[in-house]
């Protein structure tokens, strides 16, 4: 089971595990669920629109509002699939539970 907002993020960049994350835009009208093993690099890709034709670039999804950390990338991929298949409301509920202000959490990982 993954852990989310508030967990100590020490050594995250050196983990062999994975992180499932949710991005949104400034109006919170669109959500994107992704998975990575290198969160800061992946967030930079989204924010800089490295792939201009991607879904996240098209909808300006660069606000990092939710994450779960897993010990293995396989677990993270399974959780990503589960979240993507689920209803939007479930994603909103997860965000509201762990980040009720819908703040951009990027700075949590840059410390």
Image (cartoon, rainbow, N blue to C red):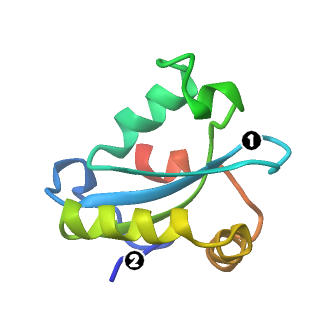
Q: Nearer the viewer, mark 2 or mark 1?
A: 1
**Relative to 36, 15 lies left or right:** left
In percent of the image, x 46 and y 29: which residue is there? 44
First in residue order: circle 2 vs circle 1: 2
Residue 71 falls in which quadrant of the image? bottom left
User: Is residue 111 visible in this depiction of the protein?
Assistant: no
In percent of the image, x 66 and y 76: which residue is there? 90
Say if 47 sits above or below 51 in the image: below
Question: Which label sits on residue 106?
Answer: none
Residue annotated with mark 2: 3
User: Callout 1: few (<14), some (14-19), or many (20+) C-alpha neighbours within 10 Å?
Assistant: some
**Relative to 93, 53 lies left or right:** left
In percent of the image, x 40 and y 77: which residue is there? 3
**Relative to 14, 76 lies left or right:** right
In percent of the image, x 38 and y 39: which residue is there? 40
User: Is residue 66 visible in this depiction of the protein?
Assistant: yes
Residue 59 falls in which quadrant of the image? top right
Q: Helix, strand or loop at disc 2?
A: loop
Say if 82 sits above or below 107 in the image: below
Residue annotated with mark 1: 25
> 88 or 99: which is nearer to us?
88
Q: Helix, strand or loop at disc 1?
A: loop
Q: CA distance from mark 2 to mark 1?
A: 23 Å
């Amino acid at each position: 089971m993954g852990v989310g907002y508030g967990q100590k993020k020490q050594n995250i960049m050196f983990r062999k595990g994975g992180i499932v994350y949710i991005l949104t835009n400034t109006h919170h009208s669109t959500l994107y669920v992704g998975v990575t093993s290198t969160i800061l690099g992946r967030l930079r890709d989204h924010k800089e629109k490295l792939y201009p034709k991607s879904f996240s670039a098209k909808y300006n999804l660069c606000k990092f509002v939710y994450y779960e950390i897993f010990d293995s990338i396989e677990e993270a991929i399974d959780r990503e699939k589960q979240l993507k298949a689920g209803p939007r409301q479930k994603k909103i509920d997860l965000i509201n539970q762990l980040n009720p202000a819908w703040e951009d959490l990027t700075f949590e990982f840059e410390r």
